[in-house]
Amino acid sequence: MMLTVKHMEQAPLERELSSGLIIAGAYADKIRRTLFAQLRDLVKQDKNVSREIARATAELNIVLYRILVDELKVDKGDVVRVRINYTYDAGSKRINWNYKSLKLEAFKRIPDEQVTRTVNDVITNKLSKILEEFKLAPSKAEEAVKSFEVSEEKTEEKPTPPTTPTPITLSDIVASVDLLGETIDGGLLVKFTSREGQSIGLATISPSGDELVLDSVIIHAGSSRRYLGRVKGKIDVYRENPDKILVELEKATQTEITKEQAEKLIREKMQSLL
């Protein structure tokens, strides 16, 4: 009986990942966020799982990139939906995609027969080569995926496009930067407090290949702004000294967003905490 229980505990976890309807330029980010959400409990138990999730999403995203961009010539604004089964083996701590289960819908003027034929051709005849190229140069493969992505704001059906506001000096309005904890993707979440003692925003710093992605939302003086940037370095530097994030955000791109967008981003960041 004990052997049976142990066997059941070690049985691979089987799930389906579905991106839902998403513009093609946002599929890579949606795949990452969905897989992290599905395996959130495993990440809480073992933070090393986040690295495997990052590896597995990068692998799947380059396969999808080759199908969508290289083969189907899909544009960034076209709508797609991705569905694929996968297993997570607790013993090896490995995520394995069942590529034969991959179902891809592309909503543009491409016949369904052509989409299915292309998917089958890539999985049958080109998959080994794609995976080998990814294995040899994962960073290069991920750069191709990133070049096809669009910012999250563009995935929202908002009538008013984001504008570039007059830059402000964050050090003039932020009194302290406090570490709130680690996120499910292996990053950090920090809180900004104003000189008046009010919480005015959050920032995440997350690993992405050999870089770190800075993403901050600040609501102050009736204005909501998002700061996006990339930096080189170790995440431990910001864990030990969160104030350094301010220095990097001063160089980041500022975008004025709506209060609703800012509140949505803040909720998502809080939900990413371990």
Image (cartoon, rainbow, N blue to C red):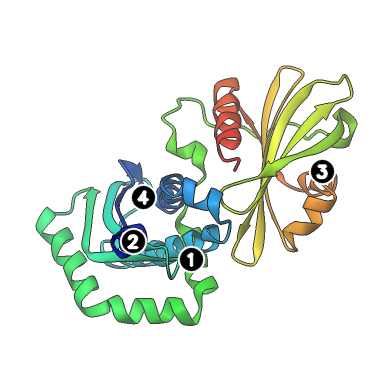
Hey, which residue is sitting farthest left in the picture? 113
Q: Amino acid at mark 1?
A: Arg
Task: Point out the tag, 3 or 4, that comes first from the N-terminus.
Answer: 4
Q: Secondary structure at mark 4?
A: helix
Q: Is residue 266 left or right of residue 159?
A: right
Q: Which residue is mark 3?
A: 246
Q: Secondary structure at mark 2?
A: helix
Q: Which residue is mark 4?
A: 24
Q: Nearer the viewer, mark 2 or mark 1?
A: 2
Few, some or many C-alpha atoms within 10 Å of disc 2 (few <14, some 14-19, many ≥20)? Answer: few
Assess whether mark 2 and mark 3 are in contact (beta carbons under 8 angstroms).
no
Q: CA distance from mark 3 to mark 1?
A: 29 Å
Q: Amino acid at mark 3?
A: Leu
Q: CA distance from mark 2 to mark 4?
A: 48 Å
Q: CA distance from mark 3 to mark 4?
A: 33 Å
Residue at x 40%, y 61% (from the top left corner): 61
Q: CA distance from mark 3 to mark 2?
A: 54 Å
Q: Nearer the viewer, mark 3 or mark 4?
A: 3
Q: Secondary structure at mark 3?
A: helix
Q: Which residue is mark 2?
A: 2
Task: Point out the tag, 2 or 1, that comes first from the N-terminus.
Answer: 2
Placement of 81 over or under 74, stated as above or below:
above
Q: Residue 197 location, x and y as percent?
A: 86, 21
Q: Which residue is mark 1?
A: 55
Q: Residue 118 location, x and y as percent?
A: 19, 66
Q: CA distance from mark 1 to mark 4?
A: 21 Å
Q: CA distance from mark 2 to mark 1?
A: 34 Å
Q: Nearer the viewer, mark 3 or mark 2?
A: 2
Residue at x 33%, y 61% (from the top left corner): 2
Placement of 160 over or under 40, stated as above or below:
above
Q: Residue 114 location, x and y as percent?
A: 14, 61
